[in-house]
Image (cartoon, helix red, strand yellow):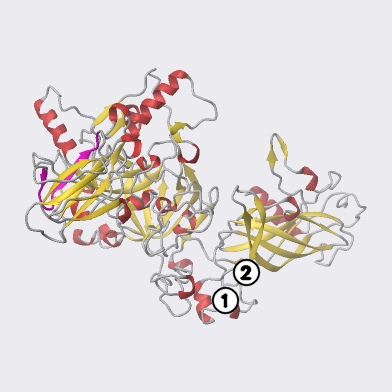
Amino acid sequence: MKRLLLVTALAAAGCYSEDGRIGTTGNTSGISTFRVEARELIGVEYEKNSAGDVIGEIRSPLSVVSACLAKYGNDAAKVPAAVKGTTECPYSIPKHMVDVTLAITALDGQGKPLESFNGPVSYRVTPGDITGIYPLRWTQLTHGVGTGTVRVAHIYGPVRIWVQDEPPQVEFSDGGVKDAGALPPSSSGPYSYATGLTAPIYFEEPTLGRVQEPEAYNNNRLSPFAGQFLTVGRPPESGPPLVQSCPPGYTASDGGVDGGVDGGMKDPNDGKLVTMVVTGLDPGGFFVTDMTACRVREFTGTGANVRTPEPDGYLPGTYASLYVYNYSFPEGLYPGDLLWSLSGSVQEFTGTTQLTFPAWIIRERVREGPPETWGKYLDQVPVPELNLRHCGLDNVVTPYVTDALCGQSYGNMKMESLESALVKLRRVRFPQAFKSCDANGNGAVPFFCQGPSGGAWQSCADEPPSAADAAEMQCNIDCTVGLGEFAGKVCAERTSYLGFGQFPVELSGPGPRVAGLDEALDKRTQIIKVSDISARTTTALTTGVNGQGQVRVWCDTPVRVKFGPSSVEATTADQPLAARARLDHVLTGNEVHVAFLADGPLQGKGECHVALNSRTRVNIITRDAVPELRVDCSETDPDAERARQCRLLRAATYNVTGHVRQVTAARPRWMIMPRDADDICCFPGPEAECPRPIKQCPPEPQP
């Protein structure tokens, strides 16, 4: 900030160096400032090969906000160049880089062209970042004039390009300056630090969605605005409130589903007032969601890590939720409150984008109304149900090794689009075992990563771990993903639980929803027509991911069931299964198929559904929301009531609502954080009770 004030003062006062020299070319008159004109703006994306190497550049015109585009019939070619980048027609915030061509003239203290100035000048941009190679960070002026191109990124709002009589920004690599030969000669200077800047070039203002949405389609770890201080929204007394500018919907020409600029529907939130709702508080801050955010189209092109595309072509979330770290409880703020604006520094903490050193202006305090209205906005916030497709699983019969951890890949944009949003888990199972893998008692256990090409789990470090660390890591792997002694069980590593309160739960797994399962991946389920002749699965049921091989069977008609080899046939002497009852079976020996025989008259469609359980886990943390819930318990506890509560906890399945956060060092790396006991309910086990203090879930509607 001091530097900004200094150069502004120099430019305003017409200051120049004491000896009157600019550079080493013999200039004898002082420079005051620069006249800087932006002549052209063009979007730039790096073209990369399959190995990730840059092989070229893709250049394209910048788009403008939807309100401006609509004035010209939604035809970008008809938008006059003169209005682009003005307050009437701001550019959309670009996800890529932007090249700005500049015309530069050096001026003396009287504002006249200074032909005696010969030397290099460098660039700066506010807000935003200078990027690209050095020739795009400085240019040479001759006889006081010159042109140049500056490459900028992460720009928004009113943008100004600065031209400065000072050294350009440098990058460092391997302890030295990277590509120093492309910098101005070391003999340049002394510098006057005179400065000039363009008139404002207007881009749209940031929304929560634009703050969160990553630039790259294959890496969800960073916000493009990380490290910048910005403001989202504006109170009415400071100008027009911020409204949504949503891109056009799908068009018939691109095979979309809802039309677009050629006559189809636009995003229903386009033009709506940005509506930021506080969705939850914690001891260090709060969560906020823009519930009028634009939908985000899912990228499925080359290089995208999309295992199963979303049916409607849009991501499950809008990137429009954010955690605000306040360093203390946000006094005076309540869930359901509306905000006009939110300011702070964008930071990444363990993979989750958050706002620090925040300030906010409240638009409406819901607690000032009667209690029955406190949830009037909170109840409108979408709460999507997290499913196996969002976790990044393939839509195939046989599970894969990385299926065990929801959202394992950093390229999973489905999960990233939901970060800090409220989501719902359906029918999850809590841990049945806790295991401490901290053999040396240092309070830490090595975490693990997937191997090359998604292979077996291994150390995340380049060098092999020590024997002691390798043993602890393997213990952690076995417990977390269900191997070895924990095959078929949900296990939580006790060191992580005691240190951070987090523990994995197992998602319901693939299968029909009526059976309490997840039908988002339809090809994971084999559907067999039942008759009085034995019929079996067509695709072999392998031992499944990590050798767990648990098969879920559900039929809408009474059947006889038999597991066996490819020749297996069911008879009237085999195991009966009632209609609409679920059978969970662990494959053994030569069991790779399951056969069915109708047991009496057919009911429903006369179908059986068969799917291998993917054993997919995600972390949750309940110690703040429900501190009295004893998750690390023992069914053999000497205290009879504690033992009974443990049985109830492990026999039940649960619906859990909470905020999603990414924790890069954790496994699984995605965590759901319920807000209070009302965010958890249970479907009891055989004893027909929920563990204290969890309430029973209401009955689910039946088809």
Q: Position of residue 510 (x, y in %)?
A: 28, 49
- Specify the quadrant of the image occupied by residue 296: bottom left
Type of amino acid at the residue the image marks with label 2: Pro
> How far apart are the two marked residues, 1 and 2, measured between alpha carbons?
9 Å
Left or right: 433, with 459 as reference point: left
370 versus 270 height, above or below: above
Residue beneath disc 2: 61
- Of 372 and 674, the residue lying toward us: 674
Q: Magenta residues, as a range?
A: 575-588
Identify the mark at residue 275; answer none if there is no mark: none
Q: Are marks 1 and 2 in contact (CB under 8 Å)?
A: yes
Left or right: 115, with 225 as reference point: right
Badge 1 crowding class, 10 Å Cα cut-off, few under 14, some 14 to 19, many 20 or more, is some
Tell me if residue 444 can be seen: no
173 versus 445 height, above or below: below
- Specify the quadrant of the image occupied by residue 564: top left
Q: Residue at x 24, y 45 (%)?
A: 676
Type of amino acid at the residue the image marks with label 1: Ala
Q: Position of residue 13 (x, y in %)?
A: 75, 58
> How many numbered discs sit on the rendered protein?
2
268 part of magenta stretch: no
Residue occupying the far left of the picture: 600
Tell me if residue 150 can be seen: yes
Answer with mark 1 or mark 2, whichever residue precedes in sequence. 2
Tag 2's secondary structure? Answer: loop
Identify the mark at residue 76; answer none if there is no mark: 1
Quadrant that contains the C terminus: bottom left
Q: Residue at x 25, y 51 (%)?
A: 511
Residue occupying the far right of the picture: 26
- Of 607 and 62, the residue lying toward us: 607
Q: Position of residue 260 (x, y in %)?
A: 45, 75
